[in-house]
Amino acid sequence: MKYDIILCGVGGQGVLSVAAAIATAAASEGLKVRQSEVHGMAQRGGAVMSHLRLSDETIPGDLVPRGRADLIISMEPLEALRYTEYLKPEGICITAKSPFENIPNYPEMDSVLSKVESLPNSRLIDAAALAKEVGNRRAVNMVIVGAASTYLPLPEESLKSAITTLFTRKGEKIVEMNINAFSLGRNA
Amino acid sequence: MSNHALLGDEAVALGAMHAGLSSAYGYPGTPSTEIMEYLLRSANAGGEGIHQAHWSSNEKTAFEEALGASFCGKRALITMKHVGLNVAADPFMNAPLLDIKGGVVLAVADDPGMHSSQNEQDSRYFADFAMIPCLEPTNQQEAYDMTRMAFDLSEELAVPVMIRLVTRLSHSRAAISTSDPRKQNVMKKADGGAGWTLLPARARRHYASLIGKQEKMNLLSEESVFNKLKTGNESEKCELGVITTGLARNYFNENSGELTSSYNHLHIGQSPWPAAKIRSLMDSSERLLILEEGMPFLERYIRGIGSETMPIDGKLNGKVSRQGELNPDNVRESLGLPSLSSLEFDTGELPIRPPQLCNGCPHEDSYNFIKEVVQGLDQSIVTSDIGCYALGALAPLEVPETVVCMGASISMAKGAAEAGYPNVMAVIGDSTFYHSGLTGLVDCVADQAKVTVIIMDNSTVAMTGGQQTMLQSARLPQVVEGLGVAKDHIRVLDAFRRSHDGNVEVLKEELAFEGPSVIITVRECVETVKKRLARRKQAKEAAAGGNR
Ligand code: SF4
């Protein structure tokens, strides 16, 4: 089994915590995991992209080749479009719906969304609304993990316990809220 | 044996700790920063005989501090990014002449592709220049293993050893297995006298001894487990011989399964170059392809001048991309394999999204008042420096006109002012000022240069993730005064929008002054404020939880 994921968004949107949740779950399932992250200048409000590779065999490198990705997980619709050439022909794209408009020439929202919808396999998730339902805008990340979870080669339970592990430090309430966000995303 | 999922940087840190590290020094710089952050976290967690870990003012002081520890017989690590080694080049080039007993390892992280840097320089040239071994890991496990080994090698050869990292390894995570930690060295001062005093007569002797060590280094490279030659066909020559260095091996392995004819493969993880192994690869191959992450360093060595005996493909003949990082896709192309079929979808042109200052960043308010003053002048120059505020050169602010290297803002401003240009301003951050701005300001004071220095004091090293500046903000005016800037011309301002009009006036006044003046604009970085508040909240909640 090999499963390659491209995670993307805008610096500061928490792409890394999405990656961390999936990577932790995969490792607990005994899979090999390679994860490349973005630190430094690009994190300041720029386009960020991270590679996550899961496999039961040795993984040769940290980067996903173009045409090999099974899944794009994006925190933002314009950013989702930026990396479609990484997808396999049958690859899937999951993205949060709300735009992050920090550039003057951000395209018409409708055209961005309709492009995402016209991808062969795509899902637009109103993650912001679902995060609001659990009572914290910052839970968008875990809504997206939930939405991606039905495609990932990982059991729901191991993702949930990964989320618990990641947020334990921040207290029970935060754990519960993120688990709820995950479940809303999963059922979206 | 245990399992940890670590960044490449963290694997270096843990490798050093398990090698019996006593002291670590560095200056933050992407992609090397996380090495020291890991060592600091471990040091803060405490424990018996835990190592020293400190950020330094710059890479040069870091290197020298490490040499001090080594002089006491202890093992020391220095961390920095590639351009930091330019700053540390003085001690770095001299250290191989010392009689090193406590191992000295330099972990330097290059940034091919310039994700967060101003150039793509390849630190392997520096290792060669200094005549020391360089180890280049291709994955997190090797980052750990090689760092451990580097300390042994350093003590065996009595020279510093370089670990060369690149962004993609520094910032990629994988599980590694570790082995039992080694104890720290006992304190034992080196024989000062001859071994550590580089006076000409003695330095000549030391240099001869360094030259003498080269044969041993070559031999170690030939035998190194990190330099592996795999032959594709025992009985006859293969059409293709591939040499990989660094991460190129990963990308080669990603694609090599699809090669239809047999090939020879030499991977080099330890230099000086293993010449005999390279020769044997060349003898058993008809064509050579050289894949190295970084500049065509090995390639030039192999090509020589007009002495090519076989076709060689690489960066110098355009078969491998000369600029930027290697990746599975461009390596695939160099191997002559067809590109993989991707999802076919025309997204049309997408606007780029470059990095920019955070919402509410104090630099924005500082630049806005500078901009207003600049717009009212016929002629002016604004030099700037390395840090978040360099992003002010991009739209919409577009204030800085130069960004060159750490500290260059002040010294370049002096040069421009003395060339006769009016209204010269230098913009520099507090941490960059301590790193390399102090000396430039001393120059300005000495010659009473007509320069207005604007220190944007956000009390942190923001770009690399919010490390603490060397000295507290409140000390900055005293430091500037101590360097000799007239007290009346040290102006401390708020970097808030509400102070805009007043700030405009102050800048105009100081531009009219005939000597050096310093304006310090003070407001904490938004990101560090957020982190501080989050920490406080967490602490409060933890305390409340404890009371329940
Ligand atoms: S990290 Fe701090 S200094 Fe850097 S852009 Fe953001 S607010 Fe400004």
Image (cartoon, coloured by chain):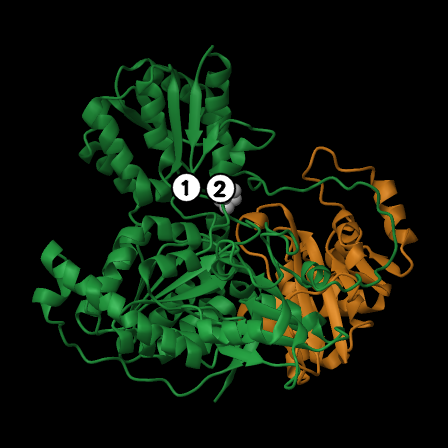
Report x, y in % for residue A103.
Answer: 69, 37
**Which quadrant would residue A19 be assigned to in this image?**
bottom right
Q: Are marks 2 and 1 in contact (CB under 8 Å)?
A: yes
Chain identifier, colour orange: A
**Which quadrant would residue B443 be assigned to in this image?**
top left
Does residue A102 sit above or below B25 in this rendering? above
The chain carrying label 1 is B
User: Is B256 or A168 nearer to us in this picture?
Assistant: B256
Q: Give, as a three-letter code, the residue at label 1.
A: Asn
Left or right relative to A42: residue A184: right
Residue picked out by circle 2: B388
- Ligand 1 within 8 Å of the CB at mark 1: yes
Left or right relative to B460: residue B298: right
Does residue B426 sit above or below A11 in this rendering? above
For chain B, what colour was chosen?
A: green
**Which quadrant would residue B539 be assigned to in this image?**
bottom left
Which mark is on residue A160? Answer: none
SS label for mark 1: loop
Instruction: Please report the residue visible at 34 percent of the width from the left and 31 percent of the height from the top.
Output: B410
User: Is B370 or B285 nearer to us in this picture?
Assistant: B285
- Check the image and name the residue furthest to the top: B378
Left or right relative to B185: residue B198: left
Report x, y in % for residue B256.
Answer: 70, 73
SS label for mark 2: helix
Residue picked out by circle 1: B458
- Ligand 1 within 8 Å of the CB at mark 2: yes
Residue A139 appearing in the image: no
Instruction: Please report the residue visible at 53 percent of the width from the left and 67 percent of the height from the top.
Output: B246
